[in-house]
Structures are given as C-alpha cells and as structure tokens.
C-alpha cells in the first residue's frame, strides 16, 4: 500500500520533536479524522534554520511530516511557502489516493507555521 | 500532476521487508490458517471425487455422501438436525439469506438489530431500509451488550425479524442471545444470530440459544474461505435470495462446493473435539496478554471483562493512532487489527467503538489481538516485550501526548 520511502520515513522520521523557542508554530488537522500535526520553525536571516514536527496519525501523516521538515530546512520563507502537498507526495514516491487529501497535511502545517511567524514579525 | 503523484508506488515484497523474521499471527478473528487435517480431508474432492452431487452416477453419489456427512458434522457442533443446515458461500451470504430471506417473504415491515453488527448484517439492513423496510438499531452499553429490555420495547406490530450477533467481531463481547430469544418466542418473531465469531470458540447450542436462524463461516474456524453454513429451524419460512436449481432445498441454488463443504465439516468436527483444550489455552494466553498490556500507562481494555470470546483482546492506547501502531507491530513481525479510521477504506472509525461510547480519538488508538490455536506463550512474551516500546515511540511523536503527563483526550 505505501511506497518504500513512506515506510522509511515512517520508521525513522527526521526532525521529530518540538522547538521550545520556535519562531512560528502551525497546527493542522483534526483528531476526529485521525491526523493531527504541529510544525515548528526557527527562522534566521529569512531562512528556515530549523523545522520540527509532532504528529498523531497514520504512516502517511508521519512520513509527510518528516518529509516536509527535510524539504523546508535551509529554504527562504518565500521558497518554503511554495512547497505544495503534491511536492511532498512526489518526494515520497506517491501516496495511496485515499491518503492524498486527509493525511497529506504537512505543506499546510508549514504554511501555518510561516503565517504564525510573519504575524509575529509584523505587529 | 495527479498522474505524477500516483505514479507507480514502489513497494518491497514481504520477504524483503521482513527478512527471516519470525512472524506472529494475532489476527485470528479476521481469518485462521486452514488446519492441515482439513486440507487433507478436502484434497480428494478436487481431482478424484470431483463429481457433481446432483448426478446419479457413482461420481455424483460420492460427492453427495461427502456433503451429507459434512452436514451431520456441522449440525452436531451446534446441536441441531442435519436437515436444518444449508451450505452457503460464507458468513456474509448466510446473514443475507436470513435477513433478506425473511424481508422478501414478508414484503414489508420492521427489523430489529443492534448498532454493533458486522457489516454483513448492518449493510443488509441498511439496504432494506432504502427499499422501504423500517430498521431499529439498538444501542449497547459501554461493554457492547444489548439490553434485552430494549429489544422487547422496540417490538412493533409489524416487526418481522430480530437479528443480533452472538459475539462481536471487534471487541469479542458475547450477547445475551438466550434472553432475547425468550422475547422473540413470546412475540412469535423469527430471531437470527450471526454466530460467525462464536461457533467453534465457545459452546453454541441452538436449543439453548433459542434462535431460529444462525450464520456460520468456515474460515474463522480453521476451514477454507468461501464456505459457510446457515442454520434454519424447521418451520421457519424464508424466500430464497438466489434463484436457480434445486440445490440445498432450493434455498441455495448453485452446484455444491464439495471440497469447501467437506472442509467446513472437518473443521467443525475438530472444533468440537478440541473446544475445551483450545479455550483453556487461548484464555490463558489472552489473560497474560491483557495483564501485560494493561501495565502500559493510559491503556484500556475495550469490551466486557468476562462476557467475551476466550481468544479476544481489544485495547486502546491514549494519544496513539491505530494504523501507525499496526504498521509498527507489523515491522516487528506481529499481525493485529485496528478500528482506526485511517486504516479503513471509508476513513471512518469503527462503528462498534463509537457505539460503546468511545470518541473518535479514542477509537483511533485501538488494537485487536485475537489468539489462535497455533500461538505460543513465547509469542505472547515477545509481544509484551515489543508493544510498550512501540507505544512509547508513537507517543513521543504525538502532539496529543504531553510530557508533563496532562493528556489531551
């Protein structure tokens, strides 16, 4: 059902955890449908210096969370904002169709975290 | 874009994914391995005794004899007359035969069932609702038990059928079928029970239960898939749901699946012989599994502590999602099942878990482990070694699990 890459990221997720002094936090998902994701970002000189996640959900939700942290790290805010759900799925060699909309939340989570950061930056 | 995303999903074969790993099968409520004796009994009916049981020649007679012997074995397991057994294509078909069989005969009316039935009953009733029948889905208590008083109160002038499962396939709860049967009898309403999970695991005697119809599946009791049986009490009238020849008294037309029927008969014979031994062993292993698992903090047992199938353990773990749990166990060679929405095709949590009062988040964290004849104490020890670590790892990842001990439920 899942690609090897999804299983790999599910088994050994990258950048799992919280950032205590995060510059931006994005919470997406809904525990009712089974996926809940929190993305933390640390910004330095307009770039994402660190990205971490915490996720309650299926293997697809965990793998997409892990993947977004890898894709976003080191990117500028503008670049990171452009990462789409499809980009994440592609990097994981695809997701089962049924998981495409429900568990593929990581790009939304990252955008929420960036939004949170920007709202704090411009009081 | 979609095409690119949905391009070939690369996956490893099981052999490559779990190299040389000993696998532990704890999903015996989904299906069971076919007993080797059952396979041996079935073998001659593929290539040697392949006759059509309706044929008059010797090939036909040996097939007919085998079917009738099987019918006796099935009837002996549940204490009925052999002529009251109809062979079917499985538990789902037997359930359909009972429910639609009564509904089609009556043409209209009211059906009483429960909120925790197997989809074979639930969706059959749902279909009949669309066709103009009225259905009452009775609630259950926190353990999954139907209150017989609720059955009595739900009866209307036009109630044509009561169908309540004997034992629940997810949480293993055993329903008070005998008490409900007294109500059905005094109101002269046919009573069907889906006994797919209970037959072969606990003593099932139709006269004690008092039901008029009962469904059996072969593959849940170490028999082959695609074969089942339907008990119908003499005098209970149903309309056939399949039309064709005169097989099985015209109730189930189709050339008989002789190897499958022989396999079911043998499986019933073995189940009868072994029931005491099997029950003793599986409940011992199950108790060990439950006690060990409940030592993990914020872990709960779903279903009734005593009124449950001897091989069923059903847990929920706070802040853990079932599909992740299942895949993590599978990585360690352990096969179980979950009621989490994420693992279901409809992306809805189990209707059974919602019916016993769990919320969606609690239902996501569920795990069913069902013990079988072949499981050993060492396997349970291994599960108890691995499971706490997996739960810990998933909780460390979960935003619902707080470090300070305040858990968001």
Image (cartoon, grey):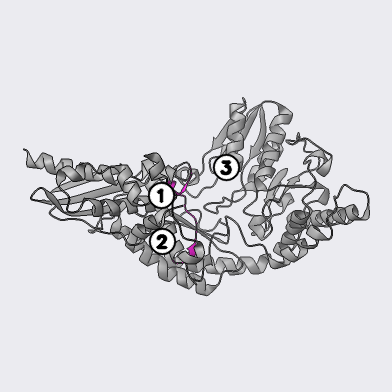
Residue B235 at x, y = what percent?
A: 80, 39
Q: Which residue is mark 3?
A: B119
Q: Quadrant of residue B72?
A: bottom right
For the magenta stretch, what is the residue range? B332-345
Pointers 1 and 2 within a single chain: yes
Image position of B59 (left or right of B315): right
Chain of the residue under label 3: B
- Residue found at the far left of this picture: A123
Judging from the image, what secondary structure is the residue with disc 3 in?
helix
Identify whether A105 is placed above or below B133: below
Residue B102, position as x, y percentages in the image? 71, 34
Queried whether the magenta region covers residue B340, the answer comes back as yes
Could you say whether the residue bearing mark 1 is in a helix, strand or loop?
helix
> What distance separates the C-alpha of mark 1 from that of mark 3?
19 Å
Question: Is B252 above or below relative to B104?
Answer: below
Q: Which residue appears farthest toward the bottom when viewing the image?
A: B378
* Secondary structure that dominates the magenta span: loop
Nearest the viewer among A34 and B133 is A34
Q: Which mark is residue B328?
A: 2
Q: In percent of the image, x 32 and y 49: which residue is there?
A: B409
Q: Position of residue B224 (x, y in %)?
A: 69, 57
Picture quadrant where residue B68 is located? bottom right
Mark 1 and mark 3 lie on one chain; the one further toward the N terminus is: 3
Q: CA distance from mark 1 to mark 2?
A: 15 Å
* Camera-side mark, 2 or 3: 2
Is the residue marked by circle 3 packed among few (<14), some (14-19), or many (20+) residues within 10 Å?
few
Q: Does residue B295 appear in the picture of this structure?
A: no
- Dot 2 falls on a residue whose secondary structure is helix
Q: Position of residue B208 (x, y in %)?
A: 71, 51
Identify the subunit bearing mark 1. Answer: B
Give neighbour class at mark 2: few <14, some 14-19, many 20+ (Cα, 10 Å).
Answer: many
> Residue shown at 38%/44% (left/top)?
B5
């Amino acid at each position: 059902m899942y690609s090897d890459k999804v299983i790999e990221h599910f088994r050994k997720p990258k950048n799992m955890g919280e950032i205590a002094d995060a510059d931006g936090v994005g919470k997406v998902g809904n525990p009712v449908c089974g996926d809940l994701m929190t993305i933390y970002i640390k910004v330095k000189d307009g770039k994402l210096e660190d990205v971490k996640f915490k996720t309650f959900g299926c293997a697809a939700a965990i793998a997409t969370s892990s993947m977004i942290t890898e894709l976003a790290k080191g990117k500028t805010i503008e670049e990171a904002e452009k990462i789409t759900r499809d980009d994440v799925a592609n990097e994981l060699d695809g997701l089962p169709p049924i998981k495409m909309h429900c568990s593929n939340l990581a790009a939304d989570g990252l955008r929420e975290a960036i939004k949170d950061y920007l709202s704090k930056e411009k009081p | 874009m979609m095409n690119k995303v949905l391009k070939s999903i690369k996956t490893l074969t099981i052999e490559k994914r779990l190299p040389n790993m000993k696998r532990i099968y704890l999903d015996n409520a989904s299906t069971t391995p076919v007993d080797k004796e059952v396979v041996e009994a079935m073998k001659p009916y593929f290539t040697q005794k392949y006759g059509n049981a309706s044929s008059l020649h010797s090939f036909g007679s040996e097939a007919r004899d085998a079917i009738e012997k099987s019918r006796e074995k099935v009837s002996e397991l549940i204490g009925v007359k052999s002529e009251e057994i109809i062979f079917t294509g499985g538990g789902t078909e037997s359930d359909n035969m009972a429910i639609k069989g009564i509904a089609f005969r009556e043409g209209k009316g009211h059906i009483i069932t429960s909120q925790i039935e197997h989809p074979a009953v639930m969706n059959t009733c749902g279909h009949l609702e669309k066709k103009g029948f009225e259905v009452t889905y009775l609630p259950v208590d926190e353990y999954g038990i139907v209150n017989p008083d609720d059955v009595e109160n739900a009866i209307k002038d036009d109630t044509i059928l009561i169908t309540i499962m004997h034992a629940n396939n997810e949480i293993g709860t055993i329903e008070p079928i005998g008490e409900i049967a007294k109500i059905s009898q005094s109101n002269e309403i046919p009573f069907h029970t889906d006994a797919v999970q209970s037959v072969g695991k606990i003593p099932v005697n139709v006269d004690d239960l008092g039901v008029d119809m009962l469904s059996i599946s072969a593959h849940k009791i170490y028999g082959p898939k695609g074969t089942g049986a339907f008990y119908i009490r003499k005098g209970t009238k149903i309309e056939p749901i399949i039309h064709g020849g005169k097989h099985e008294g015209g109730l189930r037309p189709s050339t008989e699946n002789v190897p499958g029927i022989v396999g079911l008969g043998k499986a019933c014979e073995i189940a009868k012989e072994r029931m005491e031994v099997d029950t003793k062993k599986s409940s011992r292993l199950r108790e060990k599994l439950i006690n060990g698992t409940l030592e993990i903090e914020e872990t709960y047992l779903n279903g009734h502590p005593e009124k449950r199938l001897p091989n069923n353990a059903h847990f929920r773990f706070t802040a853990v999602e079932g599909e992740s749990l299942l895949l993590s166990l599978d990585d360690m060679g352990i096969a179980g099942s979950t009621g989490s929405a994420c693992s279901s095709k409809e992306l809805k949590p189990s209707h059974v878990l919602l019916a016993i009062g769990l919320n969606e988040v609690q239902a996501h964290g569920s795990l069913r482990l069902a013990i079988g004849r072949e499981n050993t104490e060492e396997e349970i020890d291994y599960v108890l070694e691995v499971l706490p670590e997996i739960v810990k790892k998933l909780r460390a990842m979960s935003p619902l699990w707080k470090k300070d001990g305040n858990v968001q439920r």
